[in-house]
Amino acid sequence: MEKKSLGTLQDYQEDKFTKRIAFQKGESVVFVLNFMPGQKLPSHRHPGTDVYILALEGSGTVTVDGTESGLAKGEIVHLHGDEEFSYANDGDTPASLYVILTKVPEPRYAENI
């Protein structure tokens, strides 16, 4: 068994959003994305995988294939890897997203940033 504290993965920086890897096992990866107010995750895809996102803290807007939707603390989203996805923390407080990729499309998706 491996156990980690979410607090160690919630790393907010003023100049950019962060990604902190929690686990990478086999073809799956689990990480936390952290955003200060006004920070954004650019549009991208995760080809060949399913994506599960839990809003841990804060709120924001997700855009999937051009359709915007609010995302509040405690809400969960499922995306197919071919859907184009972006996120913006348009709230007043830091936001964190807990993300599970069922298959790592390529190594860069499993790196801290």
Image: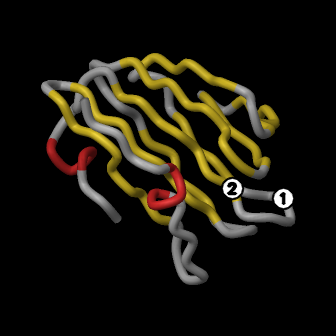
Q: Residue furthest bottom?
A: 15
Q: Which mark is residue 95?
A: 2
Nearest to viewer (mark 2 / mark 1): 2
Q: Secondary structure at mark 2?
A: strand
Q: Residues within 10 Å of mark 2 (few under 14, many from 20)?
A: many
Which residue sits at x=69%, y=56%? 95
Q: Quadrant of the N terminus?
A: top left
Depth order, front residue of 85/78? 78
Which residue sits at x=56%, y=59%? 34
Residue 90 spot, x, y in % from top left: 80, 58
Q: Residues within 10 Å of mark 1 (few under 14, many from 20)?
A: some
Q: Quadrant of the C terminus?
A: bottom left
- Residue on which the image places disc 1: 91
Q: How many marks?
A: 2
Residue 7 spot, x, y in % from top left: 53, 58
Which residue sits at x=31%, y=21%? 102
Residue type, mark 1 in image: Gly
Question: Marks 2 and 1, how far apart in space?
Answer: 8 Å
Where residue 65 sits, quadrant-wise, is top right
Residue 33 spot, x, y in % from top left: 51, 52
Query: Is there CB contact under 8 Å for labels 2 and 1?
Result: yes
Q: Secondary structure at mark 1?
A: loop
Which residue sits at x=62%, y=30%? 64
Relative to residue 107, is residue 46 drawn left or right?
A: right
Where residue 38 sits, quadrant-wise, is bottom right
Q: Residue furthest right?
A: 92
Depth order, front residue of 31/70? 31
Where residue 74 sits, quadrant-wise, is top right
